[in-house]
Amino acid sequence: MKLGLIGQHIQKSKSPQLHELLGKKLDIATSYDLFDCKLDNEQALYELLKDLKQRGYRGVNVTHPYKVWAWNIVANTFNTSAGLGALNTLIIDGEELSGTNTDCSGFVRAYQKECSDLKPGKVLMKGAGGVGRAIAFGLGMLEVEHLYIFDENTVSLQALVSDLQQAGVACSALTADAVTECALNCDGLVNATPVGHYTTPGASFSAEQVQGQRWVFDAVYTPVATEFICLARAANMSVISGFELFIHQGVDAYQWFSQRAVDSQLLSGEISVE
């Protein structure tokens, strides 16, 4: 089974290790390649998918910044909330492209593992792109009390807020000058931006903002210990790392590619965090 990952700045991705290990565990010959590329538009992504199909690929994962494009070009979506607007897992070897979003399901599983039955409460999330959409709809499934969202791209921000409200999720957009006050009155903080990634270092939330919350999540996992995560750990908060999301979404994706039940415990201790 030939699989791959399409995105930018993915040279350090552990997806090949994860999927090929799952293949060995399930006795399914699996290869997984990285397609680190800068695509100009949705059509370019579609042409790449057609090329990979011709080369015998079963499916691909899609990461930043192509998840919304993937949603727009895929005809059939499965196990995905209406209006989510982003896909990260595509099967390309059928008559039509089909896709799902295992970031959403993976986040829900990662949150429940760390925070048990506690509901998220009031949450501030930075980032309204592809992964932000998945996390936002996942928070809706977890019955978030209210989700506040900030993104410098106001078009993406307003579109996500509108889609969430239509899905019945209590949410609102924030302006930059309201972020700090909002953060200090929230139960959880979420980074769904690339800030903290090894190619875009920095802290997605400042030390001033990371105070008094119960839990945090950072979608970045290279490195796992981002500046944001370190601030939260120093304040003894419950931390859900991007690595936890990576494992859960990857297991869900492989299950979808292979049409085989996969136990995430198969990977216990076998994928390093760095």
Image (spheres, grey):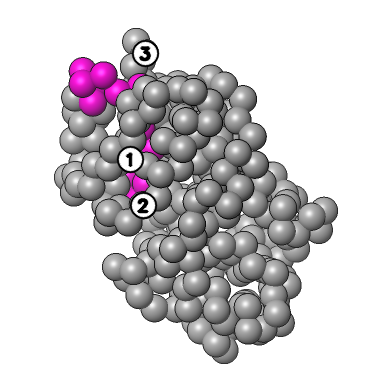
Residue located beneath label 3 in the image: 94
Q: Residue reaching furthest right?
A: 117
Cα–Cα span, label 1 and label 3 = 18 Å
The residue depicted at 57 percent of the width and 21 percent of the height is 260
Q: Which residue is at the front of the view, 259 or 206?
A: 259
Q: Position of residue 152 (x, y in %)?
A: 39, 67
Q: Residue furthest top?
A: 95
* Quadrant location of the N terminus in the rendered image: top left
Q: Is residue 67 magenta?
A: yes
Residue 126 visible within the image: no
Please report the bounds of the magenta region as a residue range.
52-68
Kind of element beneath mark 2: loop
What numbered label is drawn on residue 136?
Answer: none
Q: How dense is the environment of label 3, judged by Cα within 10 Å: few (below 14), some, or many (20 and up)?
A: few
Marker disc for residue 5: 1
Q: Amino acid at mark 2?
A: Ser
Indicate which label's residue lies in the foreground, 1 or 3.
1
